[in-house]
Image (cartoon, rainbow, N blue to C red):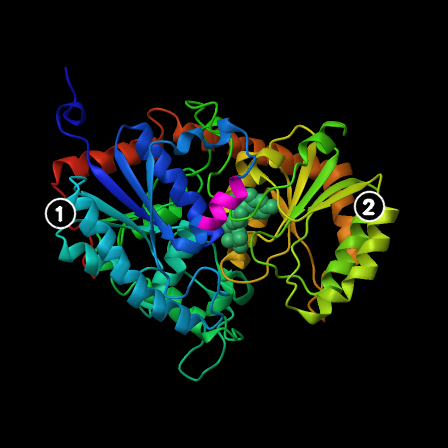
């Protein structure tokens, strides 16, 4: 019998991420999943991000970009010309994005509709909390898309509603916080923006504001899988249920339906070729180290890590991104030059790589990460043991889960100056690469890899949630399930 989906003209979904690497990657992967199910998809990003994507693809083998062919890409303006520097002030940047970006986004929807590509649903990044108003104007349902873990979704929600606080009425810091479905959390486990010591007030406002228009969204989708965060997802069913549709990563690493889909398609930087170098290394012998898309390391921290890597004696591949605006990094030049010379047979330092390809290369044996949510999922899907050096935002919570809940990694200790010292780096690498403890971490990671794949194959938990989402768009029978 013909399914409902086959009988009805396929819907057209607009997918709209915030234009940062950690947001664009999962939303583009989601777009690919919709296209594979024969939906029409338009991916909207800023002019700047579009240009960066094009530049980064220069010289990329065709198979990497094939999956993109059926996705229409549209751009909006972020209010400043794309050849100007991005505005550093968070409030100003997001205000402008809302004003100018909002207007140009409306223009995109209008044009798509008038060209006969009638929009059926807008999937928007949670930080773009003004999108539901635009969706309402066009009488189109919207889906709130959460790019972090469900545990972090729950924590922010409980703080947003005031059900949980980091300080009591007398302004005393609360040491242990309890949230349904989550392990007990101490201050250093909650996202850094919620901690009383948070110096980034505008970022706290930004994350809290994500919930201000959530009631207008018809669907809440999250990049996780229910087997990974069963209790967290279940507990949120009593508040604002979240549907897990992840892990959103290239098909070749999960369901295998599209073996050519081996890379994220939204790189904003040009990747260097590390594969030839990795091919010369023995199985599971390389320490891969990367701290995501935002340069965060101080000069002192870079030196400690470099010396720790060298002393470990293990081969390493290090994605080192320097913020060249930082004066102190200019003075790193001499140190790095010497370091690279001394470790020429041991390591390779690059400015960007295809991380999923690297993590899945047989020579890679472990991952040192800042615990961005994408990197965390990617490590689990690659079955790798981890050392964590969380910096801010949700990374602190992800690190807690990696160490204590999923048991795939170890958090590195910091000195009183907030640095992870060279001895700690060396000792921890040896623990993971040479000891029984490392073997156990790897075993656990491999178990998560199996469960992640199961979630995304036909009939798996996330696969079913994606199908259900599509069926509901088609049927338009959605009743708002959240009252708060
Ligand atoms: N990434 C990459 N190459 C690199 C470094 C990072 O492809 O050299 C990708 C990584 O695979 C992940 C994303 O960039 O998908 C970073 O997102 P994450 O949430 O881990 O961290 P963020 O950059 O948002 O802090």
Label 1 sits on residue: 479
Q: Nearer the viewer, residue 227 or 288?
A: 288
Give the structural element (helix, strand or loop) at label 2.
helix
For the point 13% across and 28% down, which residue is it?
8
For the point 88% across and 48% down, which residue is it?
342
Distance from Cα at disc 1 to Cα at disc 2 = 57 Å
Q: Nearer the viewer, residue 170 or 432?
A: 432
Quarter location, residue 317? top right
Q: Nearer the viewer, residue 116 or 150?
A: 116
Is 330 placed above or below 197 here?
above
Q: Determine crowd level at label 2: few under 14, some 14-19, many 20+ residues with C-alpha closer than 10 A.
A: some
Q: Position of residue 66 (x, y in %)?
A: 43, 29
Residue 97 at least partly seen: yes
User: Is the residue under label 2 in contact with that under label 1 (CB below 8 Å)?
Assistant: no
Q: Position of residue 256 (x, y in %)?
A: 45, 23
Quarter location, residue 409? top right
Q: Going from the N terminus, do you reach mark 1 or mark 2 first?
A: 2
Q: Determine crowd level at label 1: few under 14, some 14-19, many 20+ residues with C-alpha closer than 10 A.
A: few
Label 2 sits on residue: 312
For the point 50% across and 76% down, which residue is it?
173
Is 220 placed above or below 459 here?
below
Q: Position of residue 316 (x, y in %)?
A: 75, 42
Give the structural element (helix, strand or loop) at label 1.
loop
Can residue 54 be found in the magenta stretch? yes
Q: Position of residue 305 (x, y in %)?
A: 75, 55
**Where the N terminus falls, by quadrant?**
top left
Q: Which residues are magenta?
A: 51-57
Q: Nearer the viewer, residue 234 or 9?
A: 9
Q: Which mark is residue 459?
A: none
Can residue 331 be found in the magenta stretch? no
SS majority, magenta: helix
Is 418 placed above or below 284 here?
below
């Amino acid at each position: 019998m013909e399914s409902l989906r086959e009988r009805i003209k396929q819907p057209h979904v607009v997918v709209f991420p915030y234009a940062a690497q950690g947001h664009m990657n999962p939303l583009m992967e989601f777009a690919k999943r919709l296209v594979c199910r024969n939906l029409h998809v338009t991916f909207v990003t800023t002019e700047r991000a579009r240009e960066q994507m094009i530049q980064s693809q220069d010289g990329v083998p065709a198979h990497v970009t094939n999956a993109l062919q059926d996705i229409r890409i549209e751009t909006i303006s972020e209010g400043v010309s794309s050849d100007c520097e991005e505005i550093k002030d968070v409030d100003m940047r997001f205000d402008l994005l809302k004003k100018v970006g909002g207007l140009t986004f409306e223009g995109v929807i209008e044009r798509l509709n008038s060209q006969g590509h009638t929009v059926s649903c807008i999937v928007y990044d949670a930080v773009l909390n003004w999108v539901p108003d635009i969706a309402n104007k066009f009488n189109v349902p919207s889906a709130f898309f959460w790019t972090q873990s469900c545990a972090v979704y729950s924590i922010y929600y409980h703080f947003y509603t005031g059900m949980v606080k980091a300080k009591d009425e007398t302004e005393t810091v609360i040491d242990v916080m309890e949230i349904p479905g989550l392990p007990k959390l101490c201050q250093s486990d909650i996202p850094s923006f919620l901690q009383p010591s948070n110096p980034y007030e505008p970022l706290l406002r930004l994350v809290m504001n994500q919930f201000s228009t959530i009631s207008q969204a018809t669907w809440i989708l999250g990049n996780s899988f229910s087997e990974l965060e069963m209790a967290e997802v279940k507990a949120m069913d009593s508040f604002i249920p979240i549907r897990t549709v992840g892990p959103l990563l290239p098909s070749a690493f999960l369901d295998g339906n599209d073996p050519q889909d081996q890379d994220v398609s939204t790189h904003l930087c040009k990747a260097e070729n590390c594969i030839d170098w990795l091919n010369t290394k023995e199985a599971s012998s390389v320490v891969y180290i990367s701290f995501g898309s935002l340069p965060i390391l101080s000069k002192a921290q870079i030196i400690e890590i470099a010396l720790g890597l060298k002393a470990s004696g293990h081969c390493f591949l290090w994605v080192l991104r320097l913020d060249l605006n930082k004066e102190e990094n200019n003075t790193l030049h001499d140190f790095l030059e010497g370091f690279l010379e001394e470790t020429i047979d041991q390591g390779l330092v690059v400015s960007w790589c295809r991380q999923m390809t690297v993590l899945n290369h047989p020579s890679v044996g472990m991952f040192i990460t800042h615990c961005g949510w994408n990197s965390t999922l990617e490590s689990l899907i690659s079955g790798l043991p981890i050392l964590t050096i969380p910096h801010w935002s949700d990374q602190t919570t992800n690190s807690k889960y990696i160490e204590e809940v999923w048991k795939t990694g170890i958090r590195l200790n910091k000195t009183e100056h907030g640095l992870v010292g060279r001895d700690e780096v060396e000792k921890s690498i040896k623990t993971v690469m040479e000891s029984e403890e490392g073997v156990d971490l790897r075993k656990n990671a491999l178990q998560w890899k199996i469960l992640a794949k199961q979630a995304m194959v036909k009939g798996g938990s996330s696969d079913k949630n994606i199908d259900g989402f599509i069926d509901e768009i088609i049927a338009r029978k959605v009743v708002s399930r959240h009252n708060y």
